[in-house]
Every structure is written in structure tokens, then in C-alpha cells.
Amino acid sequence: MSGGILEYNFREGYRSEYLAHYIFSSFGPAIPVAREDDFGLDLICNISKSDGKVQLVESSYGIQIKSIKTEFKFTKKEAIKWLFHLDFPLLFAEIDKTNLSIKIFSTWSLNWFLLRINSAEDSSWPSEISFVPSNSEDFGSPDPDTGVIPIGKPILDFSLDDLTDNIKREYFQNVLKEWIDLDKKITSPEKLA
């Protein structure tokens, strides 16, 4: 980079992260990962619930954020090793800045992929993994040879305006918690034993 110049794609990506941070902070603490420490997560979040005048914090999860029509992909086999050892659920967020909206995807089918390749030598693992959304309710089967992991339809799809409605926001938070809790059951330390 030179003085007074900023790459457009990076700037747009940062704006998507700002918007996602605002959205996920409405469900509980959301901590942005510093850009220089970005290791595949953009936010580390928790769900919180009110109990009188305090918030009870629970259900940790990570978020990878992309702008609309950008692929969710991890390259290199080290990413697969990292995903094996990730101690909390991972969700993907697709931000549409034009419409101020978000689509949130579960990576539940990632668990199936990891279980399928667990017994294979890491030399046979794919060199990258791609997460592919679809219009189907069915997640489909991940392909351990190509590294293509279907993630189905978004578990949530809403606009920023929807967060001003407390009933909708509580509904979104409950859906997130259900998916996070389901994923935590699957990603217990014993899953790959």
C-alpha cells in the first residue's frame, strides 16, 4: 500500500464486519478479532439472556463474515486441523450492505465432513474446503475428496430493521442458541475419539 491508497475490496470487507459486529452484539457480547490476528474468525460471540438487571452470558460461538456473493472457503490442510480443534461452533454470516441484511448459516455439516476424514491420513485430505449454500432444506453430504461441504439454506435471514422489534430479536437469538447448542453437542471432545 502507498500513502492515501486503500484496496477497495478490503475496505468493503471491513464494512461488512462492522455491520455484522453490530448485529451479533444485539444477541450478547461480540468481540471482533483484530485484523492482524485474523485466523479464520472475524467475531467471537456469546448468547446472553436477561435476568433482572444483569445479563447471563452463555453459548460461545465464532463467526466468519463475508460480503454477499463471496465464497466461504478455507485453504490449506492446516485449516482442517484447526477446524478439528475448534472448541466452539462456527457460523457463517453473509452481509448485504446494500439492503442492510444478513444471512446466517450453520456449519453443522462440517462435523460430518470431519468425522468422515478423521480416520484418513492427512496426506489424503483436500487442500481446501468450500462451504456451499443452497436453496434446499437438506444439507446434503460433504465430499471428503473435493472438500465441498453443503451448508443448505440460511438458518436466519433478516434485515437490520428487524432488530428494532424485540419479539423478532428474541426469536433470532433463540434460533441461534438452538443451533449453537446442537453443534456443541456434536463437537464435544469425544466426537473424534
Image (tube, helix red, strand yellow):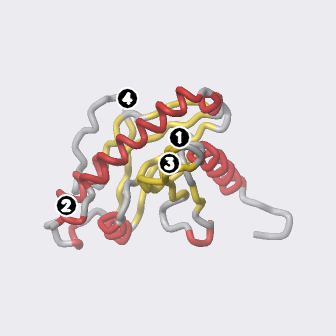
| CA neighbours of label 1 inside 10 A, class few (<14), some (14 to 19), many (20+) | few
Q: Secondary structure at mark 4?
A: loop
Which label belongs to residue 48? 3
| CA neighbours of label 2 inside 10 A, class few (<14), some (14 to 19), many (20+) | few
Q: Amino acid at mark 4?
A: Asn
In the rendered view, would you say 68 is above or below 145? above
Rendered residue at 60%/26% (across/down): 165
Q: Nearer the viewer, mark 4 or mark 1?
A: 4
Which label belongs to residue 135? 4
Q: Amino acid at mark 2?
A: Lys
Mark pair 2, 1: CA separation:
32 Å
Q: Nearer the viewer, mark 4 or mark 3?
A: 3
Quadrant hosting residue 75: bottom left
Residue under label 2: 191
Q: Is residue 46 left or right of residue 113?
A: right
Rendered residue at 35%/64% (across/down): 87
Q: Secondary structure at mark 2?
A: helix
In the rendered view, would you say 172 is above or below 121? above
Residue under label 1: 69
